[in-house]
Image: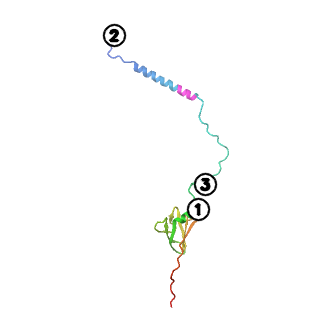
């Protein structure tokens, strides 16, 4: 019994399998060609600079301190005139040891009391007090940056009379 070709109940299509196989081999061949050319090509990479045998210069401690925010004494003194124009000393309450408080007006604002060791403005600290003066510095242990004096007392226009 011979079955004609048209009488098969199911005839699978062979074209999708053949096409997928051809595409897979084409991708494999392309990959081989790409990597072959890539490995065979001369290296156009940038050559790293040669390392010199000379030792590096030692770091400058002053430059590192400036980088980390330290200020030199010259800068503190240069900022003192600008700082003096911003501050007005209105009163001092001090004991013989230099502790106490100063009444300071900053930038024309109402006066406020500052205790010794308190930050007054822009990193400047009230360092010490005298009977009629206040000393500011860039830190509690830093060099003196500015000394503010109380204004001189005006003479009394009518001095008291001597008892008669």
What secondary structure prevails in the magenta region? Answer: helix
- The residue mark sitting in front, 2 or 1, is 1
Q: Callout 3 environment at 10 Å: few (<14), some (14 to 19), or many (20+)?
A: few
Nearer-the-camera pick, 118 or 86: 86
The answer to whether the residues at label 2 and label 3 have Cβ atoms under 8 Å apart is no
Q: Is residue 140 left or right of residue 58?
A: left
Q: Is residue 36 above or below residue 85?
A: above
Residue underneath mark 3: 63
Which stretch appears magenta? 33-39
The answer to whether the residues at label 2 and label 1 have Cβ atoms under 8 Å apart is no
Where is residue 22 shown, x and y percent of the image? 45, 21
Furthest toward the right, the residue is 54
Q: Is residue 138 visible?
A: no
Checking the image for residue 78, the label placed there is 1
Q: Earlier in the sequence, mark 2 or mark 3?
A: 2
Checking the image for residue 10, the label placed there is none
- The residue mark sitting in front, 2 or 3, is 3
Image point 61% across, 54% down: which residue?
Answer: 63
Q: Earlier in the sequence, mark 2 or mark 1?
A: 2
Q: Is residue 73 above or below residue 24?
A: below
Q: How is the image coloured?
A: rainbow
Where is residue 137 shown, x and y percent of the image? 56, 65
Q: Secondary structure at mark 1?
A: helix
Nearer-the-camera pick, 81 or 36: 81
Q: CA distance from mark 1 to mark 3?
A: 19 Å
Q: Is residue 26 visible?
A: yes
Image point 49% across, 25% down: which residue?
Answer: 28
Q: CA distance from mark 2 to mark 3?
A: 98 Å
Image point 59% across, 54% down: which residue?
Answer: 64
Checking the image for residue 4, the label placed there is 2
């Amino acid at each position: 019994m011979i079955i004609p070709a048209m009488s098969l109940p199911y005839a699978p299509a062979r074209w999708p399998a053949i096409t997928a196989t051809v595409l897979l081999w084409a991708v494999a061949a392309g990959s081989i060609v790409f990597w072959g050319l890539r490995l065979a090509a001369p290296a156009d990479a940038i050559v790293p600079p040669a390392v010199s045998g000379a030792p590096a210069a030692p770091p400058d401690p002053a430059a590192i301190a400036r980088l980390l925010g330290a200020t030199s004494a010259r800068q503190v003194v240069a900022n003192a005139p600008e700082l003096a124009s911003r501050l007005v000393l209105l009163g001092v309450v001090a004991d013989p040891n230099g502790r106490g408080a100063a009444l300071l007006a900053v930038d024309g604002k109402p006066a406020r009391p500052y205790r010794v060791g308190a930050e007054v403005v822009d990193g400047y600290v009230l360092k010490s007090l005298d009977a009629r003066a206040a000393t500011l510095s860039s830190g509690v242990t830093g060099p003196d940056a500015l000394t503010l004096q109380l204004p001189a007392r005006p003479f009394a226009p009518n001095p008291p009379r001597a008892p008669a």
